[in-house]
Image: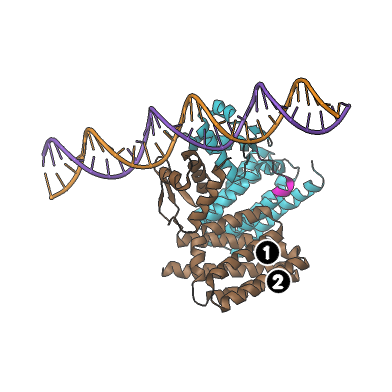
Chain colours: A cyan, B brown, C purple, D orange
Amino acid sequence: MPRTDSVTDVLRTDILAGRFPPGDRLLEIALTERYDCGRAAIRAALVELSSEGLVEREANRGAKVRRISVEEAIQITEARAALESLIAGRAAGNITEPHGAELEDIIAKMRAAVAEQRSGDYSDLNATFHRKVREMSGHAVAADMIDNLRNRAAHHQYRLALMPGRPAESVEQHAAIADAIITGDQDRAATAMHDHLMSVVEILRRWGDAPA
Amino acid sequence: MPRTDSVTDVLRTDILAGRFPPGDRLLEIALTERYDCGRAAIRAALVELSSEGLVEREANRGAKVRRISVEEAIQITEARAALESLIAGRAAGNITEPHGAELEDIIAKMRAAVAEQRSGDYSDLNATFHRKVREMSGHAVAADMIDNLRNRAAHHQYRLALMPGRPAESVEQHAAIADAIITGDQDRAATAMHDHLMSVVEILRRWGDAPA
DNA sequence: GCTCAGGAGATTGTCAGCATTTTTGTTCGC
DNA sequence: GCGAACAAAAATGCTGACAATCTCCTGAGC
């Protein structure tokens, strides 16, 4: 049984969950004990995660969890804005009745989560919404890249959901995107998605000036 | 001396140069002889190139050079259009006199290459132009992703340059992009870049209907 | 007190070999 | 003649050991 793939997945999950803080050294031997596998599997995982941008590798000096600066998080979100507005337009072009109903359902759950201040649930719904749009777009290439970009900036995104007032603002932006997609209005869907992510950039930029 | 990185680079270059045709099996032992290194280095290279999308790996079944369908090439170019228009706008925002002169120089050389039907040189200048724009943008995240996208669709791009009349059309699109960037007009630069790449998509789409 | 050479320890890079899996080729039965 | 089971070959997955490299600490010299 080739364990190497599953090790990559588990390590990725652990990094994204913050179980390895940014800057932490990832010693191969320590990881072999943690995941009960050989160094070969760990090495393959580190190479893979390195090209995903989650891990930083230096020759003969080992691997560290990559630290994403606010400046880089801004660039990541800008790139996402470009790609997600593309697929939002496609999703609007491919809209069907059942898919539209799913989007509306997610929006309703988001509103409920915001009203009850369940910020963890809101984050999950946020991810679900964007994933659904990606699926609907049928644009596999852009969807993969967006998935990676989301992972890379995951830490900063998490802080966003804790900002007072932000979820309420965000949910209405999502509602606007959903409405445009359901209507089949490609241009408006693309613009709404772009505006949504650029508002995230705006907040990150304020953090950059006065970091929390 | 860690050879593994250089092996990755050489293998990538060989694949991009078409020395391994799409679909070719990449046997680890054969590659160790070709590049005079151990299997560990080859494996690391294959893992890396796999996550770059150049190589396809299946558990226990080895690696193959990934075959990029016309449909996928279209998606790749669409994603590039989204990202390159972003950085073209940034480049326009960062324009300086010496950088502008460099762009004009590249355009002049492109016109010469087209006039003398040196399609190989034209392809190189094309790559140089886009690389220059990426540098000027200062947007490292988008630049990296574009670099990867270009590699993945390299084979199709190459066919484009051999199309009669295409270089002449393409060089004027590049001139329009350069003019907008030099003028510092961010919106026009983004639009011109987007139009340029969408004209590539249009050609690919025609190929998809009636493959060569 | 400071700088720099040297060495010990820790960590990654590489290799050779074995285990496991897939594929191919062959033989047997119908 | 055809299909299924079985065996041999090929290729990848993985492990352990060794080599190369880097880091950090010590101590001598100035």
Please tell me whether mark 2 sits on a helix, a strand or a loop: helix
**Residue A71 sits inside the magenta stretch:** yes
Instruction: Tell me which chain the residue with mark 2 is part of.
Output: B
Q: Are marks 1 and 2 in contact (CB under 8 Å)?
A: yes
Residue A23 visible (yes or no): yes
Q: Position of residue B55 (x, y in %)?
A: 47, 50
Comes first in the chain, label 1 or label 2: 1
Q: Residue at the spot x=50%, y=66% of the render?
A: B158
Q: How many marks?
A: 2
Residue density around tag 1, few if under 14, some if 14–19, many if 20 or more, within 10 Å: many
Q: Does B144 sit above or below residue A155?
A: below
Rounded to the nearest angstrom, the CA distance separating label 1 from label 2 is: 9 Å
- Quadrant of res A11: top right
Residue that badge 1 annotates? B88
Q: Residue at the spot x=70%, y=55% of the render?
A: A198
Residue that badge 2 annotates? B180
Q: Does B36 sit above or below residue B143?
A: above
Which region shows up in magenta? A65-73
The residue lying furthest to the bottom in this view is B115
Is residue D9 rendered to the left or right of residue B136? left
Please tell me whether mark 1 sits on a helix, a strand or a loop: helix
Q: Position of residue A56 (x, y in %)?
A: 64, 41
Residue type, mark 2 in image = Ala
Q: Position of residue A163 (x, y in %)?
A: 74, 42
Where is the C terminus of chain A found, in terms of image quarters?
Answer: top right
Closest to the observer, C7 or B89: C7
Residue type, mark 1 in image = Ala
Q: Position of residue A150 (x, y in %)?
A: 62, 47
